[in-house]
Amino acid sequence: MSEQVRAPTPAEATLTQVESEDDHNQQSYYKYVSSCDSVEEDLSPLAGLKVIDLTRIVAGPYCTMILGDLGAEVIKVEVPGTGDEARKWGPPFVKDSKDTCYFAALNRNKKSICINLKAKKGQELVYDLARKCDVLVENYVPGKLRQFLLDYENVQTVAPHLVYCSLTGFGPKGPYSKRPGYDVIAASMGGLLNITGPKDGEPCKVGVAVTDIATGLYAHGAIMAALLQRARTGRGQKIDCNLLSTQIACLINVGSNYLNAGLEARRWGLAHESIVPYESFLTSDDRLLTVGTGSDKQFVSLCQKLELMPLSEDERFISNQCRVENRAILIGLLRNRFKEKTLCDWLDILEGAPFPYGPVNNIAQVFADPHVQEIGLVKQMQHPTTGTIYKVVGPPVDFSEGVNAVRLPPPILGEHTEQVLTQLLGYSQDRIHSLKASHVIQ
């Protein structure tokens, strides 16, 4: 078996100018050349990568958690004494502990260090981290880090290799650029609330912070792309992600409907604007079953399963366009049919169907589902110091040759300060004691 050698980090590499061998396109470019010959046994895709995490709440921590799952060493920099605001977002709390479930959901696979960013020595400490790390992610209010000389323009002078990613409410340009942003504000301004909720009811907030999550996912992908570009150029760069732009991008077909057809969106409840049937139906035991037929062929199969074959030949329902135009009539017929049997009866009848279907589950039913249990999606870990047992939803992505895994429990505030300062930065104990005494670190 061939040896697995990890990519060098900036701390182990030298920046070398290389001349192209192509005589017709001679150009100079830069690449990192490793000075480390060690064999890497960790098969995680991002093994050896180091991330400075200056984020709090949801979008940023979700992004850095994904990087941590993929093997990056994530160093979560927190405010001494208080830390990430999500540490206080309880109840509920993890069983037999004071840790909030909110914080636990977003902060596995991270090391916590506490630095006073207002102090000059604290800022110098972050510069030292930047020299050793590959990525910095932050979601401070625009302009705040500039006050601490930790904005991109200042940091890149000491760490030009660094990929610096900012997550904000509205981005660095435009009239709203200085505003703080939360998920629900971007979801409100970006149209999501207006298209979510009962057909004849008020706008509704989605049950989880999907705009935050989507922004974190966009940021994670952008960071990966910037790292690939750095492998060619040797240079880092600034990445800007924001909640509002992400939310508008996530409007997909609804946004396209307006831009290309002038169609203003409306709320459809459990139904779909452009596909019929594609919604939830009440069964005889008052459970909801969601069915979606995305093609005419799937609609015919549904009619077969429901023993309503005449509907598949009815001119009013012969195509999706016809079914959309005659939505009320068709949905009324289907609702009457689904009310004749229990959810379990219908699940038995639909087994093996070529169209997608599934029950509307509450959260207990989600985690009790035999499929969810068999694939082992829920992971359990115990904190080595406190003994607290955490259960988390593990990474939803599997690699054939890589490891994407839960490794570390959510950290105690400042748990790894000394470890990072000694092992990564090489600080002496005297220097660490001095920083503690001057309240620069915790």
Image (tube, rainbow, N blue to C red):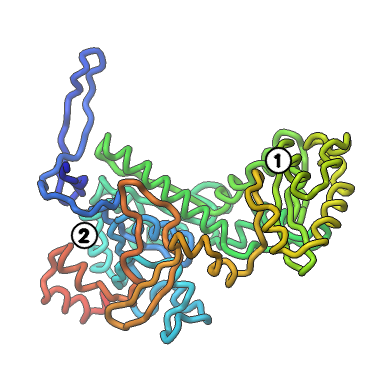
Nearest to the observer: residue 165 or residue 354: 354
Q: Position of residue 192 (x, y in %)?
A: 66, 54
The kind of residue on which mark 2 rests is Asp
Residue placed at 62% from the left, 65% from the top? 207
Q: Nearer the viewer, residue 2 or 65?
A: 2
Task: Give the mark count.
Answer: 2
Q: Position of residue 428 (x, y in %)?
A: 11, 71
Mark 2 crowd level (few <14, some 14–19, many ≥20, 10 Å Cα): some
Q: Which residue is mark 2?
A: 128
User: Is 250 displayed left or right of 167 in the figure?
Assistant: right
Identify the secondary structure beneath mark 1: helix
Along the horizontal axis of the image, is 174 left or right of 284? left
- Report how far apart the C-alphas of labels 2 and 1 lie in the structure: 59 Å
Using the rendered image of the protein, determine whether residue 117 is visible from the camera's viewpoint: no
User: Which is more N-terminal, label 1 or label 2?
Assistant: 2
Q: Secondary structure at mark 2?
A: helix
333 relative to 201, above or below:
above
Residue 163 at x, y percent in the picture: 33, 48
Contact? badges 2 and 1 (CB < 8 Å): no
